[in-house]
Image (cartoon, rainbow, N blue to C red):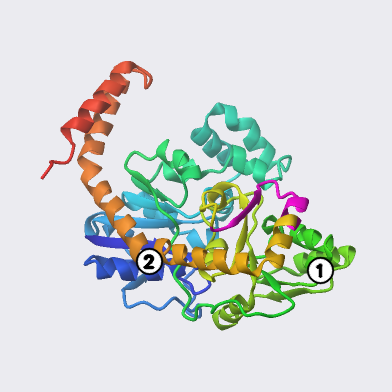
Amino acid sequence: MKICWVTPFALRSSIGRVSAAVTEQLAARGHQVEILRCEDQDDPAEPLHPTALPVHHWRRYDLSGLRTAFDVVVVNIGDNYPFHAGVFAVLDAAPCLGIFHDFYIYNLFSGWLHHNGLDYRRHDAEIVATYGPQAEPHAVAVRSGQMLDMGEIAQHLPMTEWLAGRCEAALAHAQFYAPKLEAVVPGPVAVTPLCCPDRATPPGPPKAKTPLTLTTVGVMNPNKRVADVIRAIGGSDALKACAYRLVGPISDDERAALEGVAAEVGFANLVIDGAVDDETLDRRLDEADIMVALRKPVLEGASGSACEGMLSGRPTVVARAGFYGELPDDLVFKIDGEIVIEELREVLERLVADETLRRRTGQAARAWALETLNAARYAEAVDTLAQAQVTSRPLLAVGVRLGHELRGMGLADTDPATARIGATLQTLFAPIEP
């Protein structure tokens, strides 16, 4: 197949890192693959992920040729407008297979409105078109500032369906949000675990040392619940003896807030690295003893930081919610999704006290992650879904035509005849058994 892979490809994009590994594997499977960058701007000073494949930027590419030049157009969708601005034009240009890295894309939606100069009327209209008239009060509440909690917005207006309905097929990274895709995507929908390539310099086995180091990696925003971890540590003499290291971008305000929490609970061993390069991250993962990868609310389809924790061979603490809740129970340490500090403290104390438990669980988690989260396995899943998408097109075309005719005759979607017609079409267009 000829595949156009639409993705942010800047070196600082984690989706770009996944894309570089997966497209290499798709090419190795015999497909002709080209990468179409979807960042808003094409900054020549921006370093990109290394690849041997052709790379284009959507603003300098004739999108009108996508439909005829490629068998499949794969669009990676995340909740960051500057990284994903080009996906809207691509979705308009060709039938697409959407990979939904986040189940909550309200920020992408908001960025689209802002950058196109659209006002509150378009905001409300898009939400009502996606969720029906009953969603209008939520639309008004969120854009007027009455609804600020991201968890509440995710519950009522994740906007996943807003773009999923424009895709011909879709891929999710966890079961918990697959129904949102299945409800609006006309073609096949699949679920496969996120690809998280092993690091070029993977961490070695944990070293016997004191004090132990608890580590959180990724962008340090409030929903990573770092403040809760610090409060859990502050209530335990055993945990206060450990170091807690934060590795990833952090704002000055968030740094000050977390340092204030540490001072409040009397914890002196908080280490904030901020943004680091790959070499430093490799070293910090090697120095870690316990990984903490919490989220509340859970907004992403899967978590690169949790996957990194498992690949590092360290015990990883997660919330029992969303993607995290679907991880194997015996390979991570789950706490309630509400992040109860007392429960978190008990889990951390158990891990600090039991070296055998840390090593055994970490080794098993790494073995599972290497087998499950690799690029070859992910490319196979994309390949299978893309083949299903291509073979489903005749059925979808006939279904759309019949649907228009039946709607014109006044047949309701809930009429039993609709289900019978759908079942008949499935039989007529079923794959021929070899």
Check disc 2 and give the amino acid type: Ala
Q: Is residue 249 left or right of residue 191?
A: right
Number of residues whose C-alpha sits closer than 10 Å to that of mark 2, classed few (under 14), some (14–19) or many (20 or more): many
State the quadrant of the C terminus.
Answer: top left
Tell me, for residue 375, which label it has, or none: 2
Where disc 1 sits, the SS reads helix
Q: Is residue 104 left or right of residue 379?
A: right
Q: Position of residue 147 (x, y in %)?
A: 71, 41
Whether residue 302 is visible: yes
Q: Residue at x 49, y 81 (%)?
A: 201
Check disc 1 and give the amino acid type: Lys
Residue 121, compared with residue 88, is above or below; it is above
Q: Residue at x 28, y 57 (%)?
A: 383
Front residue (pair 268, 101): 268
Q: Is residue 136 left or right of residue 349?
A: left
Front residue (pair 116, 94): 94
Where disc 2 sits, the SS reads helix
Q: Which numbered disc flags the more N-terminal residue, 2 or 1?
A: 1
State the quadrant of the N terminus.
Answer: bottom left
Query: Does 391 lie within the magenta span?
Result: no
Whole-Å distance between the Cαs marked 2 and 1?
39 Å
- How many callouts does the rendering have? 2
Query: Does 343 lie within the magenta span?
Result: yes
Residue placed under numbered mark 1 in the picture: 240
**Quadrant in the picture for residue 151:** top right
Per the rendered image, the range of residues in magenta is 331-345
